[in-house]
Image (cartoon, helix red, strand yellow):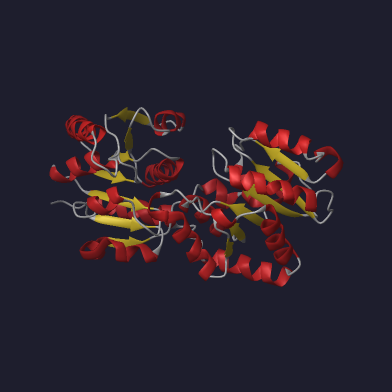
């Protein structure tokens, strides 16, 4: 079986693609997989490190206004279609799968026009513009949330709610392994704070008040991933605020965490943005959360993602514009003082998890690949 997977720009599009690729490869032999992305996106670095072949096309996203840049984008898109045709013609895939990002546009469109089975995987409650357009051409659409179906309108009959694909190591890791790997204490509640790979300044700054309030508390330990760009700033703020991690004894900060599956396994409560894959990982582990959606996400999709968890009783939502250190401390105190509520949230979160999502998407892809015109 020969598979082209296209997706990129952000980790939220790339990591699901990698998970789907690995799952398909484990289910069918022989299997050859080619990723198609852009040289500018994270995929150009991440995908080869995962051991997959990678090729790039020259394309970029459209602006939401008419400008010379928009005209240039049209020409780049036409170039991208031509490059996609060449790649597809040479590789001869049995199926082409898109996981989001503007690079999917020319690749999936060209594959569809060439009569090759195609499908897309949409992670968010509010589908991206590219995927909504592509839904008219592809044969199947796998969505992370059932609520996303309505946004595909007349194409709704193609849509299957599978959940979002999760790395198997996230599911497999145990709490005892996570605690040991990260040097944490097994008898304390672990608060995991992550603002995304680049960090979140508003969350990081609000955490100063959390440090002051909970520093030295023997009932809780804090693991805070600041993001590479924010780490030095947070260390400086802590020094200026007189917060000494060594004296507190329950605060661990890191710019980036390569063993995130271990951190999720150790976590009892999380403070997160509301990217679809991050939420999928929280729910598959059954971790209650305080969610602070990124306010500049396209179509405000992170807030919609977060509200789904809040309505299910799995999370508390604080809007970024309303976030303060004191508000964050208040919400944490409410949760930590009501362990029964925290347990109910954990159970609600677990019910929303889809540990078999990658397998369901892979089976759908294999079935499509085996379907002749």
Query: Relative to the observer, which residue lies in front, 370 or 101?
Result: 101
Q: What residue do we see at 74% from left, 44% from top?
A: 180
Query: Which quarter shows the N terminus?
Result: top left
177 relative position to 315: left or right? right
Q: Nearer the viewer, residue 352 or 238?
A: 238
In front: 265, or 309?
309
Is residue 296 shown above or below 336?
A: above
User: Percent from the top left, x then y, of residue 265?
Assistant: 64, 51
Closer to us: 140 or 333:
333
Q: Is residue 287 visible?
A: no
Q: How many labels were placed on the picture? A: 0
Q: Position of residue 356 (x, y in %)?
A: 46, 57
Q: Is residue 133 visible?
A: yes
Q: Residue at x 62, y 61 (%)?
A: 288
Position in image of residue 127 (x %, y %): 34, 55
- Left or right for 134, reference 233: left
| Residue found 73% across the figure and 50% down from its top | 209
Q: Quadrant of residue 159?
A: bottom left
**Quadrant location of residue 79?**
top left
Residue 181: percent from the left, percent from the top? 71, 41
Q: Is residue 308 left or right of residue 114?
A: right
């Amino acid at each position: 079986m020969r598979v082209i997977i296209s997706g990129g720009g952000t980790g939220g599009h790339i990591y699901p693609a990698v998970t789907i690729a690995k799952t398909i490869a484990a289910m069918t032999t022989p299997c050859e997989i080619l990723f198609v992305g852009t040289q500018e996106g994270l995929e150009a670095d991440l995908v080869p490190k995962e051991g997959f072949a990678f090729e790039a096309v020259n394309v970029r996203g459209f602006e939401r206004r008419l400008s010379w840049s928009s005209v240039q984008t049209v020409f780049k898109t036409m170039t991208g279609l031509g490059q996609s045709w060449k790649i597809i013609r040479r590789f001869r895939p049995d199926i082409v799968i898109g996981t989001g990002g503007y690079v999917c546009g020319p690749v999936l469109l060209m594959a569809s026009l060439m009569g090759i089975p195609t499908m897309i995987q949409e992670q968010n409650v509010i589908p991206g513009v590219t995927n909504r357009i592509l839904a008219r051409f592809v044969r199947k659409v796998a969505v992370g949330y059932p609520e996303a179906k309505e946004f595909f309108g007349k194409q709704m009959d193609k849509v299957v709610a599978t959940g979002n694909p999760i790395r198997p190591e996230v599911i497999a890791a145990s709490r005892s392994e996570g605690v040991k790997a990260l040097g944490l204490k097994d008898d304390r509640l672990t608060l995991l704070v992550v603002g995304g790979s680049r960090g979140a300044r508003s969350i990081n700054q609000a955490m100063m008040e959390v440090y002051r309030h909970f520093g030295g508390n023997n009932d809780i330990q804090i693991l805070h991933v600041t993001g590479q760009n924010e780490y030095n700033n947070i260390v400086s703020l802590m020094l200026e605020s007189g917060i000494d991690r060594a004296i507190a004894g329950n605060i661990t900060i890191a710019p980036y965490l390569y063993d995130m599956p271990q951190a999720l396994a150790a976590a009892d409560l999380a403070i997160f943005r509301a990217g679809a894959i991050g939420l999928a990982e929280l729910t598959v582990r059954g971790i209650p959360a305080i969610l602070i959606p990124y306010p500049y996400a396209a179509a405000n999709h992170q807030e919609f993602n977060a509200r789904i968890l809040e309505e299910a009783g799995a999370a508390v939502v604080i809007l970024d514009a309303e976030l303060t250190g004191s508000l964050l401390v208040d919400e944490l105190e409410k949760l930590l003082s009501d362990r029964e509520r925290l347990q109910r949230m954990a159970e609600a979160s677990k019910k929303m998890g889809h540990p078999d999502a990658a397998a369901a998407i892979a089976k759908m892809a294999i079935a499509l690949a085996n379907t002749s015109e």
